[in-house]
Each structure stands twice: as structure tokens, then as C-alpha cells.
Amino acid sequence: ERMAETHWYGGLSDESKSRLRSLGGAVYGLAVEYLTNKKGREETMRSAREVGREFGEYLADINISLTDAIEAFILHRSPLIQVASDIVKRREGLRGQDSNAVSLVTQITDEFLLALVEAHQNRQRGKGAGA
């Protein structure tokens, strides 16, 4: 597990680790969906933004800094791009579109990351106001 490479992951509860795995799995699933289902891309992008918001809020709730949240994202981006490339190589209708796969996965993960950052910042501001 890539998150185990971070300095903060080991200190999380099993419940928090499970929630992060679940959200991470949703991101992978949405990226694959975005890559393979042209007709549903707009809806998939909306879903990715929503998962990004959930992820950002949750990370803020468990006191993971924005820098650490972005580090976790970066750790997972390359493997996700590799998965996308592998799918393109295996799927009949997608073969030869490796560079397009990278572009598509970059699009959806960029939107996810922007939503995560915005939600994290908003949640942190909200915490500060209540303190």
C-alpha cells in the first residue's frame, strides 16, 4: 500500500484507513469509467469532483494537512496512469491510444485534486471559525 510510505498513515485508526481505501478505490473506478465510457464522461467527471470533495473533507476532519493530502494523491497518480495504459493495451477498441489514456486520466484526476483541495481548505476554514 502506497499510503504506508507516508509519515502520517501509520498513525491512523483502522477505520480511517478503511475509509481512505474506499475513497481511493472509488477514484480508481471513476478513472477507468472515464477512460472506457465516452458517453458517460460528464457524469463521471461530476462524480470524481464529488469524491474529491469527500476525500478533502475527510482528510481535513482527521487532521491530515493539505500538503500531506497532495502527497498521497501524487503517490497514487502514476500507478493510476499505468493502470489506464494497461487497460488501453488490453481493450480491443482502445488499443494504440496510450497517450490519449494518459490525457484522459490526467483530466479526471486534475478535477478530483482541485475538488479535494477546495474542500480541504473550506473544511479547515470552518474549523478555524468554530475554534
Image (tube, rainbow, N blue to C red):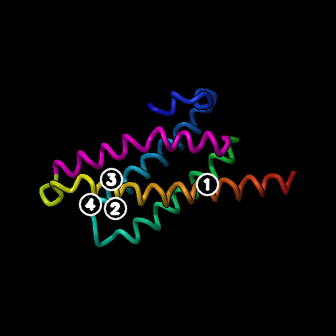
Q: Amino acid at mark 1?
A: Val
Q: Secondary structure at mark 1?
A: helix
Percent from the top left, x then y, of residue 127? 79, 52
Q: Which residue is mark 2?
A: 34
Q: Secondary structure at mark 3?
A: helix
* Residue toward you, 33 or 78: 78
Quadrant housing residue 97: bottom left
Q: Residues within 10 Å of mark 1 (few under 14, many from 20)?
A: many
Query: Disc 1 and disc 3: Cα gap in Å?
Result: 22 Å
Query: Disc 2 and disc 4: Cα gap in Å?
Result: 6 Å
Q: Amino acid at mark 4?
A: Thr
Query: Disc 1 and disc 4: Cα gap in Å?
Result: 26 Å
Q: Secondary structure at mark 2?
A: helix
In the picture, the disc for residue 105 is none
In the picture provided, is 81 more to the left or to the right than 13? left
- Per the picture, the main secondary structure of the magenta-coloured stretch is helix
Q: Amino acid at mark 2?
A: Tyr
Q: Secondary structure at mark 4?
A: helix
In the picture provided, is 131 more to the left or to the right than 29? right
